Image (cartoon, rainbow, N blue to C red):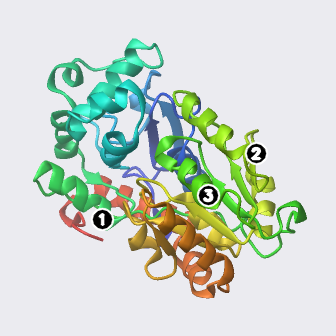
């Protein structure tokens, strides 16, 4: 079926409300880009796609379908589930417990060592409420907890939309249940990341780390690995609001070395892409990544990429990336230096261009919408 034929049963445009976590813009992350770009490209196919935050009111009668994001934050979803309205979920099912138990500092780090992953996420939600950074929206979540809430959502969703098969398997193993799902790729925008970009020579041959500065992203260990070496390292991102002590620890250590630099002001993609173009290596030595959008972006601009094995990165990058262990300084250093001196891998760029674009992601999402709305007997189990 041609995409131009995707319409609702009355022949009108499909209308979707995309419900995101209430902190989507106050604490932006990879899911912010995912939601905004998915909506942007769906609109190019004629879909009415409105983004609404979980703490806002929704006029449900205006829509054919609800598209939720971040099942790991079930309290943002539960209050919007309606008996007579179908919904899908982009699961973004992350697993941060290793970082929380092994590498997180302070009182919370000590406390998390005695909790299981679901208890940790439940505690984080309650903490955000107590600190007035968010609200508890559902009594079900408050009394049933994290995993029962996630299970409740997954069982009622028409279709789960993970970014990888591995992400779905992680959710399936946690809940010990099977669910219909369709893989929707994470992606880049080739209109921004392309050959026409002119490099910013101020970052010529730099090693980049792009992303929010927080313990999970592991910038401190990269500084330990590369501080005082011959390589110029630039860390681009804002500090996480609840991890300012980690940010100051990174800055204090970096101040001992002349080759470690920070850019913490907001940089839009049009500027960032010129920095990627000039750089030689991008590093994301995180404790967990579903994909790492910045890795996709950097690779499209001819950077070799160093990534973590923890999460779903191998499904995206296979043998075309350099893999390091986030808790091993020598591993991080070895893989960065190897990536720096090796020639750029042209296979990865070509693979991303052919598979991981927002146009492809929107097509896959639209196919999922159509299946849910009009062809339930053909719900995919692993496509």
Name the residue located 27 percent from the left edge and 20 percent from the top edge: 138
Q: Nearer the viewer, residue 112 or 345?
A: 112
Name the residue located 40 percent from the left edge and 52 percent from the top edge: 8
Name the residue located 48 percent from the left edge and 68 percent from the top edge: 331
Foreground mark, 2 or 3? 2
- Could you give the CA–CA distance between mark 2 and mark 1, rounded to whole angstroms? 33 Å
The residue to which callout 2 is attached is: 263
Which disc, if any, is residue 166? Answer: 1
Name the residue located 34 percent from the left edge and 56 percent from the top edge: 161
- The reply, left or right, for residue 130 in relation to residue 301 is left
- Could you give the CA–CA distance between mark 3 and mark 1, rounded to whole angstroms? 29 Å
Foreground mark, 2 or 1? 2
- Could you give the CA–CA distance between mark 2 and mark 3, rounded to whole angstroms? 34 Å
The answer to whether residue 118 is visible is: yes
Image position, residue 176 (x, y; %): 10, 53
Which element carries disc 2, helix, strand or loop? Answer: strand
Which element carries disc 3, helix, strand or loop? Answer: helix
């Amino acid at each position: 079926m041609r995409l131009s034929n995707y319409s609702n049963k009355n022949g009108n445009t499909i209308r979707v409300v995309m419900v995101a976590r209430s902190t989507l813009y106050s604490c932006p992350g990879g899911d912010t880009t995912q939601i905004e770009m998915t909506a942007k490209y769906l609109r190019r196919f004629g879909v009415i796609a409105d983004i609404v935050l979980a703490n806002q009111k929704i006029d449900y009668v205006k829509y054919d379908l609800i598209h939720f994001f971040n099942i790991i934050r079930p309290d943002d979803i539960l209050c919007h589930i309606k008996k007579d309205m179908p919904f899908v979920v982009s699961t973004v099912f992350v697993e941060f417990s290793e970082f929380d138990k092994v590498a997180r500092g302070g009182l919370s780090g000590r406390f998390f060592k005695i909790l299981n992953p679901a208890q940790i996420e439940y505690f984080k939600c309650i903490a955000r409420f107590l600190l007035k950074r968010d609200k508890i929206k559902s009594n079900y979540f408050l009394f049933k907890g994290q995993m029962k809430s996630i299970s409740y959502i997954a069982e009622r969703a028409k279709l789960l939309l993970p970014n990888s098969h591995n992400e779905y398997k992680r959710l399936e193993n946690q809940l010990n249940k099977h669910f219909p799902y369709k893989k929707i790729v994470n992606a880049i925008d080739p209109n921004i990341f392309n050959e026409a970009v002119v490099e910013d020579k101020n970052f010529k041959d730099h090693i980049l780390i792009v992303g929010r500065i927080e313990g999970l992203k592991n910038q401190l260990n990269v500084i330990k690995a590369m501080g005082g070496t011959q390589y110029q390292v630039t860390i681009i991102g804002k500090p996480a609001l609840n991890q300012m002590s980690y940010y100051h620890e990174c800055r204090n250590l970096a101040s001992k070395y002349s080759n470690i630099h920070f850019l913490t002001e907001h940089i839009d993609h049009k500027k960032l892409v010129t920095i990627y173009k000039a750089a030689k290596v991008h590093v994301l030595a995180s404790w967990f990544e579903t994909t790492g959008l910045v890795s996709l972006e950097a690779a499209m601009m001819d950077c070799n990429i160093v990534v973590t094995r923890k999460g779903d990165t191998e499904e995206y990058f296979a043998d075309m990336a350099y893999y390091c262990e986030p808790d091993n300084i020598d591993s991080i250093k070895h893989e960065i230096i190897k990536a720096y001196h090796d020639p750029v891998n042209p296979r990865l760029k070509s693979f991303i261009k052919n598979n991981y674009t927002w146009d492809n992601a929107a097509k896959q999402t639209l196919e999922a919408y159509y299946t849910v709305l009009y062809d339930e007997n053909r719900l995919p189990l692993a496509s």
